[in-house]
Image (cartoon, grey):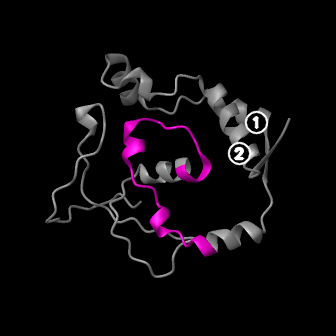
């Protein structure tokens, strides 16, 4: 999703998003979604309204990841952009190896706080409900992501 509108005039008012916090329910300017890949329908123009959460909704649909909240639940996934025959062919002709990662190196990076002080303040003030935030510490989240990636056979973890 390209997110740099540059002040273009848009004759269509931005829609509202499903979000328990009214401050986050108003979407901004429309931005183009260009979907590219070996399984994308060639030359297709899709009129479905997507938002940045559509990427997460696609991961939920394709890989069954847990919902991150009502906004993700309401977002349209990118399925209309996918050519089912190409996706089926890709599964049969997969030509890449799983990425090899070292768990100790990844966990050494898990101390990074992300630098989202504004999000932390919104959570502490109650503007973001605690139920909409993954409460696990970063190391537990990294371990969970690695387990899921291994189950999908896209990552092999060493050490």
- Residue, disc 1: 105
Crowding near pointer 2: few (<14 within 10 Å), some, many (20+)?
some
Residue 141 image point, x, y percent: 62, 30
Q: Nearer the viewer, residue 74 or 6?
A: 74
Residue 109 appears in the figure = no
Write the residue at 36% across / 29% down. Answer: 118
Write the residue at 47% across / 36% down. Answer: 68
Q: Which mark is residue 55?
A: none
Query: Is residue 56 depicted above or below 106 in this figure?
Result: below
Q: Secondary structure at mark 1?
A: helix
Query: Is residue 57 depicted above or below 96 in this figure?
Result: above
Mark before the other along the chain sequence, 2 or 1: 1
- Residue, disc 2: 149
Q: Nearer the viewer, residue 91 or 14?
A: 91
Write the residue at 32% across / 19% down. Answer: 126
Residue 100 image point, x, y percent: 80, 49
């Amino acid at each position: 999703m390209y997110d740099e509108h540059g002040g273009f005039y848009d004759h269509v008012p931005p829609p509202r998003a499903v979000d328990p916090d009214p401050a986050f329910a108003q979407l901004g300017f429309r931005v183009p979604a260009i979907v590219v890949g070996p399984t994308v329908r060639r030359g297709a123009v899709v009129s479905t309204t997507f938002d940045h959460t559509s990427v997460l909704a696609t991961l939920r649909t394709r890989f069954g990841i847990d919902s991150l909240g009502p906004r993700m639940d309401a977002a349209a996934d990118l399925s209309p952009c996918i050519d089912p025959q190409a996706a089926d062919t890709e599964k049969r002709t997969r030509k890449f190896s799983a990425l090899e990662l070292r768990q100790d190196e990844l966990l050494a990076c898990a101390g990074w706080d992300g630098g989202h002080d504004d999000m932390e303040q919104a959570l502490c003030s109650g503007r973001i409900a605690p139920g909409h935030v993954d409460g696990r510490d970063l190391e537990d989240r990294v371990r969970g992501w690695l387990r899921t990636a291994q189950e999908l056979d896209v990552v092999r973890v060493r050490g």
